[in-house]
Amino acid sequence: MPGSKNASGLNNPINESQGGTNAQNFTQARINMSLARVYDSQTASYTALAADLNKFIRFSGAGPFALNLTAAATLGSQWALTVRNDTTSDLSINPSGGELINGLALLELEPSASLNIFCSGTAFFTEGLVTAVGADRALSNLANVAINESLLPTADLAVDLGTPALRWNNLYTQNISTSETAADTTVIGAFDVDDALFTPFITLTANNTATCALASAVTSVTQAVSDNSTKIATTAYADAAAAAGGANIQLSNLGTTSINANLIPSADVTRNFGSPSKRWNNLYTQNISTSETAAATTVIGAWDVDGAALTPFITLTANNTPTCALASSVTAVTQAIADNSTKLATTAYADAAAGGGGASIGKIYPITFGGFSN
């Protein structure tokens, strides 16, 4: 029987019916595969056998299907075949047991693609197009995985995980965070039922001082009154707390109170108790006093009717020797003559006291006796 030349140009016997049984290497096997090819069609998953040596196996139909490879030791180092995927899904190529193909446990062949598979006796290798390793493009063939790389989108904010109609069940993560770019936001919200509007409820914003803003529509569970914890308080809780005894901002819900702390303004001489049009009824106090700062004054006076000027009547002044000055317009009740007490005397009292009990001062005339003057 005539021989054929191998890739080296040497005469080696080649069994054409076996398609490369006598091939010495993958190059020779590839040459031999061009001889006496056998077409085989599959419309379901199939396991390649030793008898499929040198076959051209074409998969068709909807898929997804798998080409399972018999153990490499069974097929031997001279075994090879070609496979084409004419299904509408990726075709899985699975070595037997823990064996590998191109150093991997699984290959995926995309639709309309083909490749050659070679067996070394212990593993498998391919020549041609392979679209993915391990998982198919739809990630529909995953087992429990341990991903060892970060999964990154092609561009910032360009790719979604899931859709409004196809959602992931649970998300387990250490952090949900914004990017590190100033003013970038991460929003937690909800779609309305016709997917027309997205309502943000929690907005995280990246900045030198990052912020977390709750929308006004966010609600919570109303806690029991006087919970006094770090739980979120609702408006209902605040209203109930105020009604139960707490004062509101306007202090308009006060009952009889027993204040147990000093009431102090935020800065000296900047806040008022009452106003010219809204006055307190009575002031009960032990002392009305100046501050302890030298020359600081406390003034008791009255406004004119249009509120344009305050007229001081009594001025208290702080100093090493404090003073109390009455304005000249201050008046008092005129006491009875000779009251002689610690009551205040008016000018009328003083005038009456001077005119009613002492000698008046007038001219002094000389006394004349019989023509003689003295």
Image: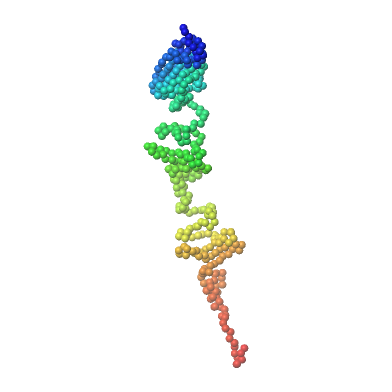
Q: Residue at x 47, y 36 (%)?
A: 156
Q: Position of residue 364 (x, y in %)?
A: 58, 84
Quarter of the picture containing the C terminus is bottom right
221 is higher (above) or lower (below) than 363: above
Q: Position of residue 27 (x, y in %)?
A: 50, 16
Q: Residue at x 59, y 87 (%)?
A: 366
Q: Residue at x 39, y 19 (%)?
A: 43
Identify the residue at the far front of this view: 9
Name the foreground residue: 291 vs 79. Answer: 79
Q: Position of residue 350 (x, y in %)?
A: 55, 74
Q: Residue at x 55, y 72 (%)?
A: 339
Q: Position of residue 320 (x, y in %)?
A: 61, 62
Which of the colour schemes (rainbow, by chain, secondary structure, one colour) is used? rainbow
Identify the residue at the far left of this view: 194
Quadrant of the rendered image containing residue 195: top left
159 is higher (above) or lower (below) than 374: above
Badge count = 0
Name the foreground residue: 247 vs 73. Answer: 73
Q: Tell me if I can see residue 347 in this picture.
A: yes
Name the foreground residue: 72 vs 38. Answer: 38
Name the foreground residue: 212 vs 139. Answer: 139
Identify the residue at the far bottom of this view: 370
Q: Tell me if I can see residue 221 in this picture.
A: no
